[in-house]
Amino acid sequence: MTRIYEGEIVFQEGTRVKEIRREGMAAVPKIRMEEAKKNVDQMVDPRISKREKAEILASVDPEFKFLPSEEREKVLGVLTPGELAGVYMASAGYRIDQILGPTPYINRTSVPYRYVLTGGVLLIFLGALLLIF
């Protein structure tokens, strides 16, 4: 699939992470950014069990930590992978742009639109030169 998203052409859409904000969330990051990036990838990975995802989220969200395990499973069953990753990032004290950059996609391939535009103009110019000579 290809589509344009805020100045980038997205060739393969990954999981779109949703911005989640809750009252009482951490204003200062609780963990290192590298660890947060790794955990966000695990939150959207379908091969990771709900139990493991619950443990990852409980490590940064005190409200979620004190829920009984049955309630945790219910919460994880309701949230989409993008929402789950957003909740994790908010609980860890990060914004989406700090972890994922300018686009809110995980596991996506993209090329900045200006590169595609420049390449097209260059090809037109080279084609015109070949026709002249």
Image (cartoon, rainbow, N blue to C red):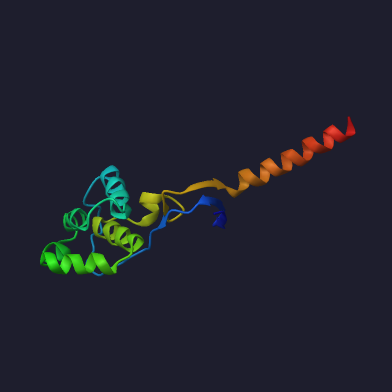
Which of the 4 quarters of the picture holds residue 130?
top right
Report the quarter where the N terminus lies. Answer: bottom right
Q: Is residue 130 above or below residue 64?
A: above
Which of the 4 quarters of the picture holds residue 86?
bottom left
- Residue under the image location 28 percent in, 60 percent down: 90
Q: Where is residue 48 in the image (x, y as percent from the top left)?
A: 25, 51
Please tell me which residue lies in front, 81 or 64. Answer: 81
Q: Is residue 34 left or right of residue 121?
A: left
Q: Position of residue 100 (x, y in %)?
A: 39, 50
Q: Residue furthest front?
A: 47
Report the quarter where the C terminus lies. Answer: top right
Q: Is residue 73 left or right of residue 19?
A: left
Please tell me which residue lies in front, 101 or 43. Answer: 43
Q: Is residue 65 left or right of residue 89?
A: left
Q: Residue furthest right?
A: 132
Q: Where is residue 45 in the image (x, y as percent from the top left)?
A: 31, 51
- Residue under the image location 22 percent in, 58 percent down: 50
- Residue under the image location 19 percent in, 58 percent down: 54
Q: Where is residue 88 in the image (x, y as percent from the top left)?
A: 27, 58
